[in-house]
Image (spheres, rainbow, N blue to C red):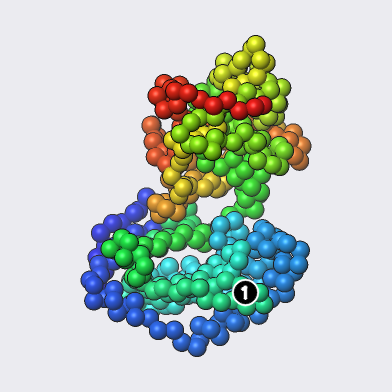
Amino acid sequence: MSISMVEDVKGRGGSGYVVGKDKQVLESWLKYSFDNNDSVSTERIAEILSDIYEEAVDTNTLGSLDMMRRMVARLGENGYVAVDSGNQIDMIQAEQAFDFCKAVDEKEMDELTIIVVMEMGIRKFDLKTEDGNVNIVRGYYQYDQNGSLQNRSTVSYPADFWQYTEEGYLIFEGSYFSDENYILTLSDTPEHTMLRILPLDEKCREYNRKYILPVCYEQNNLFLCNWSEDDFGDLDFYDLFDRFYPMMYSQPVPYMADENLGVGAVYQIQGELFENVIGTYFNMDRETLRSKTTYLSELAAYEYRPRGFYEVEYPDIAYPEVVRYRENEDGTVTLYVNAVYPGGNMSKEFSHITVIRPFSEESFQYVSNEITLPEGDHEIWWHSNRLTEEERENLFPKEVYGRT
């Protein structure tokens, strides 16, 4: 099979390849037959992880960061290249992955197996390269009641796209044939994978877990626009109430959308509650907050509408990753964050600088946010703003008021 280099993504520190393949080549690869080595390998992996898995089941901590970290470390001790599915733990035995990427670039022959630890099982990638081509066999295995790893699916495909990025991610993508999906879409099933190879400062990971990931990018714009304590800009404090309330009270927001999506539910939230939630994470006075929301002075309450059917977002979005930090003399911490977007094969869709002000182990405030890359206006297409008043009136001429 020949390779034509149609794109060289130099700005990300690696080369992106599109592999030219005809139907005959694709079908030959999809006739992959399983052998005994695969079952022996997964049985060995299950044996290596058995005591950690049993402890996690007994303590109801399966999928926790600590258990995932122990599983990754244990696999590394036994010579496996391993990482977690959320890229929150440094890849173990990463040198093997670096060597494989080098072999691809230099068009040498090499093989590599990567184990991706998941909450209820593993994904196993068997990679082979020759003459710059990369072929992938991906197996998904799930734990059964006895703690054994059972094969749920295995597919094979040549890499249509292969890239090691400047940010330290290995990205590969390809398509495989599936009877069910072909009936629905009349096309092959795409699959893309992003795995961080380059290790990351553990302090960056701690800052990310504590200050950035709890809010993330879903259904809010805290990290998607420029703002500061001097000018809160276009921040949507209703969306932030939705994110901060669970952080404060460890339970979901009680103000739910109406069961009938054809109407818009409206609530009046007690002013003290709304201001306490927002004021916990921002240094702002109540007058500023009221000027940026709908405050009903006669009821001493904030008018609140939960997001509805017309305000949903695209489900496949980026996730934040703190890649650098600076602890400032005034007690604030500056976090340099990349938005990693697996769905777009981008290890840096955009970047932002977020400043936080820690008070104690559990208490902190957000100070500012600045989008730094790309420069100028950047439309984050998967994000949806809440409806404007005019849009809402057109959709919901008669709204239903819920109880406070």
Mark 1, other Cα within 10 Å: few <14 / some 14–19 / many ≥20? few
Q: In percent of the image, x 35 and y 53: which residue is there?
A: 10
* Quarter of the image where one finds residue 390: top left
Local secondary structure at mark 1: loop
* Quarter of the image where one finds residue 230: top right
Residue type at numbered disc 1: Asp
Task: Please indicate whether residue 136 sits to the left or right of residue 96 in the image.
Answer: left
**Eyeballing the image, is 145 above or below 357?**
below
2 and 232: which one is in front?
Answer: 232
Q: In percent of the image, x 54 and y 73: which residue is there?
A: 141
Using the rendered image of the protein, determine whether residue 330 is visible from the camera's viewpoint.
Answer: no
Q: How many marks?
A: 1
Q: In percent of the image, x 47 and y 53: which residue is there?
A: 167
Q: In percent of the image, x 44 and y 61: which residue is there?
A: 193
Disc 1 target residue: 144
**Eyeballing the image, is 34 above or below 349?**
below
